[in-house]
Image (tube, rainbow, N blue to C red):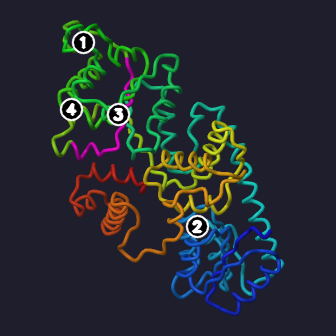
């Protein structure tokens, strides 16, 4: 029991001291705070398994504590204490994510029973993560590890779109797994036995990109000593994944539009019209609507690509997926490097849950691979993590209107807040909110989808 850490938050000092003494005698490691603000600071600085918080306090309510703690680490369980033991209060705290509630004066036997059940459930959930991942391999989207609601929504759209012939546009930050979704769509489609061909538009020059997509005839340019088929021909009857489609130059955009409309094209330097049957899945980390407004992307091509739209949320907005991903990458790289590493410490996982991951899932994978390679023990510890992750746990609560992280993260946080305010001021009317923000309603809808806002 000694490894479990409990945080007590109550503005009644005598109550805090009494409960703290009781829990310490039971073998728990106990932190105490006499305000919600101090309690959240402790959550930021320490590994906490369970919070027991008073419902009514001067600075923050128990619900405020619950919401802020869950935003820091969704794995933290919260129990609310209240002297106002009405059914309405109990219903409210349970509906907002508390695992249980207690009425004051607290019955110590009941408190011990609730804590024991909560910590046993937490242990069971941890042990079942590996089993859930193994069971998920029976399904077509077996390589995509997720338990978060926002990610499940994206996967639901992908699963429904997969059997169709429609083009799919996948948007999301770098490292979120857009190609993984594209491959899953292909595997779940009637074209699964045909080729899946990928091309990254950002990795090629304009001339090379056109040749890669459409192929070229012998003598079409210097160095073209033979005819070469392009990705469209290679993907015939299969799926072509066009990554970073926002990087397409204007001339190539025109040719791509023609293929989408007519399923025909000519190789570079050729005159023969080639017919293909290809399903297009495109992806970008850019806002194509902004590129259209700047005259850098064709709106007719955008509408052809954006028949089905899937937005992949960044990892910082799907933190409940982090433990599952950690387990997966830990086993993967332990096997690859022949290391007898079977688990990760609670402290290390807590630091990962608090980190914002500007590089998304790709960054998490790199962190776990490095930790596995460098670790000398059977359990990954906080000492095995890079300083960028360790530093995240030491940050104190930000002041109003201040945002932490890299410049892009701070810009996103401010953008999210401004959109939220505009919607509140407009009573949820998107047209009015868009006018207030100075953007189009279409652009606002994209932002709402990007940030998972209802």
How crowded pointer 4 is (Cα within 10 Å; few <14, some 14-19, many 20+) is rated as some
Judged from this view, the residue extending furthest toward the bottom is 14
At a point 53% along the width and 26% down the height, the residue shown is: 187
- Residue wearing tag 1: 224
The stretch in magenta equals 278-291
- Residue wearing tag 4: 249
Mark-to-mark CA distance, 2 and 3: 36 Å
- Residue wearing tag 2: 96
Judged from the image, the secondary structure of the residue bearing numbered disc 4 is loop
Q: Is residue 29 magenta?
A: no
Which numbered disc, 1 or 3, marks the residue that appears first in the sequence? 1
Disc number lying in front (1 or 4) = 1
163 versus 389 height, above or below = above
Which numbered disc, 2 or 3, marks the residue that appears first in the sequence? 2
The N terminus, quarter of image: bottom right
Which numbered disc, 1 or 4, marks the residue that appears first in the sequence? 1
Mark-to-mark CA distance, 2 and 1: 64 Å
Q: Which mark is residue 307?
A: 3
At a point 42% along the width and 15% down the height, the residue shown is: 237
Q: Where residue 107 sits in the image (x, y, percent)? A: 80, 82
Q: Where residue 174 sits in the image (x, y, percent)? A: 40, 45
Judged from the image, the secondary structure of the residue bearing numbered disc 1 is loop
Mark 1–mark 3 contact, CB under 8 Å? Answer: no
Judged from the image, the secondary structure of the residue bearing numbered disc 3 is loop
Mark-to-mark CA distance, 1 and 4: 22 Å
Mark-to-mark CA distance, 2 and 4: 48 Å
121 relative position to 293: left or right = right
User: In front: 4, or 96?
Assistant: 4
Which numbered disc, 3 or 4, marks the residue that appears first in the sequence? 4
């Amino acid at each position: 029991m000694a490894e479990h850490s409990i945080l007590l938050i109550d503005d009644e000092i005598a109550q805090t001291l009494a409960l703290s003494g009781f829990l310490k005698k039971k073998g728990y490691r106990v932190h105490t705070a006499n305000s919600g603000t101090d309690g959240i600071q402790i959550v930021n600085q320490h590994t906490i398994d369970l919070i027991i918080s008073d419902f009514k306090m001067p600075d923050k309510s128990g619900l405020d504590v619950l919401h802020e703690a869950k935003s820091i680490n969704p794995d933290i369980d919260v129990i609310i204490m209240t002297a106002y033991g009405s059914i309405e209060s109990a219903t409210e705290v349970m509906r907002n994510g508390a695992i249980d509630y207690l009425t004051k004066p607290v019955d110590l036997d009941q408190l011990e029973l609730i804590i024991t059940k909560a910590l046993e459930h937490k242990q069971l959930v941890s042990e079942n993560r590996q089993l859930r991942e193994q069971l998920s391999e029976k399904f077509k989207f077996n390589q995509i590890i997720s338990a978060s609601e926002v990610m499940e929504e994206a996967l639901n759209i992908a699963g429904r779109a997969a059997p169709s012939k429609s083009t799919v546009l996948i948007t999301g930050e770098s490292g979120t797994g857009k190609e993984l979704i594209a491959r899953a769509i292909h595997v779940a489609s009637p074209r699964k036995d045909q080729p899946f061909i990928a091309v990254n538009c950002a990795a090629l020059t304009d001339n090379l990109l056109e040749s890669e997509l459409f192929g070229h005839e012998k003598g079409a340019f210097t160095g073209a000593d033979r005819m070469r088929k392009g990705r469209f021909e290679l993907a015939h009857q299969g799926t072509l994944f066009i990554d970073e489609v926002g990087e397409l130059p204007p001339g190539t955009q025109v040719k791509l539009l023609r293929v989408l409309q007519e399923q025909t094209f000519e190789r570079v330097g050729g005159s023969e019209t080639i017919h293909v049957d290809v399903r297009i899945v495109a992806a970008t980390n850019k806002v194509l609507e902004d590129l259209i407004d700047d005259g850098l992307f064709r709106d007719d091509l955008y509408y052809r690509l954006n028949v089905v739209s899937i937005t992949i949320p960044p990892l910082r907005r799907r933190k409940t997926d982090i433990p599952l991903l950690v387990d997966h990458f830990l086993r993967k790289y332990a096997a690859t490097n022949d290391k007898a590493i079977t688990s990760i410490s609670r402290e290390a996982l807590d630091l990962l849950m608090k980190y914002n991951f500007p590089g998304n899932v790709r960054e998490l994978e790199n962190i776990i691979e490095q930790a596995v390679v460098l670790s000398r023990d059977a359990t990954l510890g906080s000492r095995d993590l890079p300083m960028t992750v360790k530093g995240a746990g030491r940050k104190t609560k930000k002041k109003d209107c201040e945002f932490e992280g890299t410049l892009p993260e701070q810009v996103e946080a401010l953008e999210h807040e401004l959109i939220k305010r505009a919607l509140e001021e407009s009573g949820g009317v998107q047209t009015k909110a868009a006018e207030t923000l100075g953007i189009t309603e279409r652009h606002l809808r994209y932002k709402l989808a990007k940030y998972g806002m209802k």
